[in-house]
Image (cartoon, grey):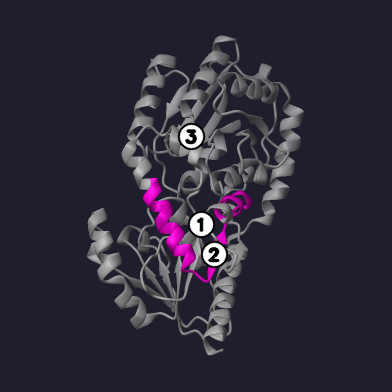
Amino acid sequence: MVMRSLGIDATNVGLGGGTTHLVEILKHFSLKNNNFLKIYVFSSDKVLNQIDDFEALVKIRSPYLNGSLLKRIFFQFFIFDKLLFKNCDILFSITGDYIGSFRPIVGMSRNMLLYDKKIVSEINSLSQKIKFKLSFYRQKRSFENSIGVIFISKIARELGSKLIDLNSKNISLIHHGISTKFSNSPKDQRSIEDYSYTNPFQFLYVSTIHMYKHQWNVIKAIGDLRDEGYPIALVLVGGSIFSPAEILLTKTLKQVDPKGEFVNWKGHIDYSEIQNIYKNIDGIIYASTCENMPNILLESMSSGTAIACSQTQPMPEFLKNSGFYFDSYSIESIKKALVFMLNHPEIRKQYIFDNQKQVKEYSWDKTSNETFDFILSCFHKFNNNVQE
């Protein structure tokens, strides 16, 4: 049976990694044997406006998807299914949380916080904990109703399979790609003695502000090392997505660098411009302890810059042996990793070479092809089972 149309549920996708993934897999979509005559994407205007138009694409807009959470929930429960049954043969839930009555569904695991109880327990917010608990049960129900599930890292597949019974499901591990715009020539690796407080070794940390990102520990480590004589500075890029974390970050900045001399928090920078921030820095820090597949880490690997990184999985799954690892909860551990990195330019050079070679395995063209091929294979298996 030829599939006429695919629906993509992006009703819960916000600006960030989810939008990047959606934009890129559609940008690299190709009409294969006319299996996908139409692709209907359901999302907010702010997401749909970032997706390039092409002949097979139909963008489904609704004022309910541009409003509050309650309006979005109203759309999902009372409008969505009617549109799906009318237009689609199969649904791809890109956030893995569709719980309506349409079938068949292919789900996707994106949010590692749904599986990491330790991280959730560290978030001192009852409303956030309730939110994650409800989101987990919503994903559990969605996956149990799905014919196929896509994971984007080995650790997510491992944890997800322990918490949700997926034995009867088609499972696929499909990594995200990386845009070539992040690829830079390897930077010259100089001795730390070549830097000064007026021309410091510039570290960059790109990530949103949340409790599991540990920006405050990085700032304290940078401040301590400056006091010990290391001519270094830090650029932070990322907007706040959790107000208690923003408060902690602001408090730490006032304590460690009250005059703004060596820490520059630039806030959110749009994805279309983010590649430019990598061009004028000397080293990268990535201190997150809860990621599914860390796109920022892959972008960093491509940038021609050495990386000091959290030792928590899945970071080593992708960075492998070519990072200066540390415990993000320990300021002393971060300092030790940074000192070793600063004092060994020859190791930095080797790690950069290894990372740029490794990151070539990831492309959005490959991600797109594998994703749509998997959805198609799930549809055919479902159709064959129905006919039997």
Residue 71, picture quadrant? bottom left
Q: Position of residue 207 (x, y in %)?
A: 47, 39
| Residue 238 among those drawn in magenta | no
Residues 67 and 104: in front is: 104
Q: Distance from label 1 to label 3 (Cα)?
A: 20 Å
Q: Is residue 71 left or right of residue 279?
A: left
**Mark with earlier residue (1, 3):** 1
Q: Which residue is mark 2?
A: 149
The amino acid marked with disc number 2 is Val
Q: Position of residue 269 (x, y in %)?
A: 41, 42
Q: Quadrant of the image for the N terminus?
A: bottom right
**Mark with earlier residue (3, 2):** 2
Disc 1, SS: loop
Residues 232 and 132: in front is: 132
**269 relative to 154, above or below:** above
Q: Which mark is residue 378?
A: none
Mark 1 Cα-neighbour bin, 10 Å: few <14, some 14–19, many ≥20: many
**193 relative to 110, above or below:** above
**Mark with earlier residue (2, 1):** 1
- Please report contact status of discs 3 and 2: CB closer than 8 Å, yes or no: no
Q: Position of residue 122 (x, y in %)?
A: 44, 32
Residues 367 and 92: in front is: 92
Residue 62, picture quadrant? bottom left
Q: Which residue is mark 3?
A: 213
Mark 3 Cα-neighbour bin, 10 Å: few <14, some 14–19, many ≥20: many
Which residues lie in the magenta part?
A: 132-160
The amino acid marked with disc number 1 is Ser
* Residue farthest top in this picture: 228
Residue 125, picture quadrant? top left
Q: What residue sits 61% from the left and 31% below the top? A: 283
Q: Which residue is mark 1?
A: 109
